[in-house]
Image (tube, helix red, strand yellow):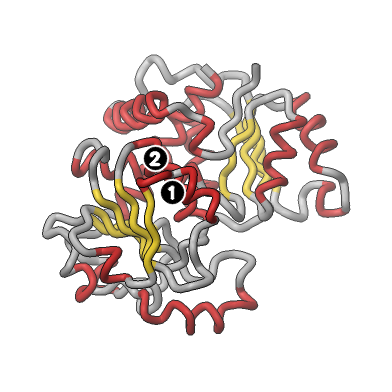
Amino acid sequence: MTRHFLTLKDLSPSELVALIHRAIALKKDPTGPQTADLMRLRTMVLIFEKSSTRTRISFEVACAHLGGSSVFLSPGDSQMSRGESVSDTARIVSSMADLIVMRTGEHNRVCAMAEHSAVPVINALSQDFHPCQLLADLQTFFEHRGNIQGACVAFVGDGSSNVCQSWVDAAAMMGFELRVGAPEGYHPHPDLISAAGGHCSVTTSPREAVAGADLVITDTWAGMGQEEEKAQRLAALTDFQVNENLMAIASQEALFMHCLPAYRGQEVSAEVLEGPQSVIWDEAENRLHAQKALIELLMG
């Protein structure tokens, strides 16, 4: 049966932990004998309907390290831009390629791609979830602090973002406490919070969310496709900036993460982003290693 990776829940908790440890091992030895030929004579197709820096580079480099080739399709490159259905595209691409990586808007588009594809499909970002980012984030925490089980994690800002909603999934799977500090109207989907049980709570107070936290996370306040809402979002989220005053009430050893791109002076201050608690550059690099481990899992 073809395996896909559309949300974190497509992995079992034990598979997720094993994947993180594999990513750490691959980072230490990126050209080990187990990996060199995995994608030899295989092709990965990237269908990106949204712009990308880290995601595109990390997937293309990962495929190259594994001995494969990649084909990149931007929004105007495929017939989907002229109305061809996702299902038809999935059938055609999967008849020629070995792996599909899709970055899109509505989550149901990547689900439709997976439903009709004969090869694995990876969600490289959708409106609702960003599971590949979580693989790198979890790897980064493991590297700096060890297993995240039992930790306290705070997400501050737009709790309805795809990154935050994937953190909600991770909380129950990995057994840690997630506190989301977000204004009304910017909370994670209620079904996700319910599914996470007692592992996730939501507050409208950023200080309440961050107090004593081992990890503080934020994301841009106006993501791709939300440009028209930018002024409204900035007004609603202005009190949710992660700055030195907010980090001061987290644990003394707290880490700071941001999936990038970051807008200094909006969702995070420059002092925090560039400060000693920030692990954003490790986090960004780990996209490569975590996704290489994911490709191994799906293609091995």
**Number of numbered discs on residues:** 2
Residue 234: x %, y % from top left: 48, 80
Decide if residue 275 is on the left or right side of residue 17: left
How busy is the neighbourhood of tag 2: few (under 14 within 10 Å), some, or many (20 plus)? Answer: many
The numbered disc on residue 168 is 1
Q: Is residue 274 left or right of residue 230?
A: left
Q: Is residue 277 above or below residue 42?
A: below
Image quadrant in which you'd find residue 4: top right
Are the two marked residues, 2 and 1, in contact with CB atoms closer than 8 angstroms?
yes
169 or 195, which is in the foreground?
195
Label ID, residue 294: none
> Cα distance, mark 2 to mark 1?
7 Å
- Residue count near mark 1 (Cα–Cα under 10 Å), binned few <14, some 14–19, many ≥20: many
Which residue does the numbered mark 2 point to in the structure image? 172
Residue 18 position within the rendered picture, expressed as x and y whole percent measured from the top left = 35, 25
Using the image as rendered, state which of residue 187 and residue 142 is in the foreground: 187
Secondary structure, mark 2, is helix
Frontmost residue, 182 versus 296: 182
**Image position, residue 205 (x, y; %):** 33, 72
Quadrant of image for the N terminus:
top right
Q: Residue furthest left?
A: 252
- Position of residue 80 relative to residue 63, above or below, is below
User: Whole-percent x and y of residue 247?
Assistant: 21, 68
State the residue at coordinates (17%, 68%).
Answer: 249
Query: Which amino acid does the dot numbered 1 rest on?
Result: Val
Amino acid type assigned to the residue bearing label 2 in the image: Ala
Residue plotted at (49% across, 37% down): 8
Quadrant assignment, res 50: bottom right
Question: Residue at the right extreme?
Answer: 83
Task: Look at the numbered disc 1 and give the secondary structure of its residue.
Answer: helix
Q: Residue at 21%, 53% (x, y): give it.
A: 214
Rendered residue at 41%/44% (across/down): 197
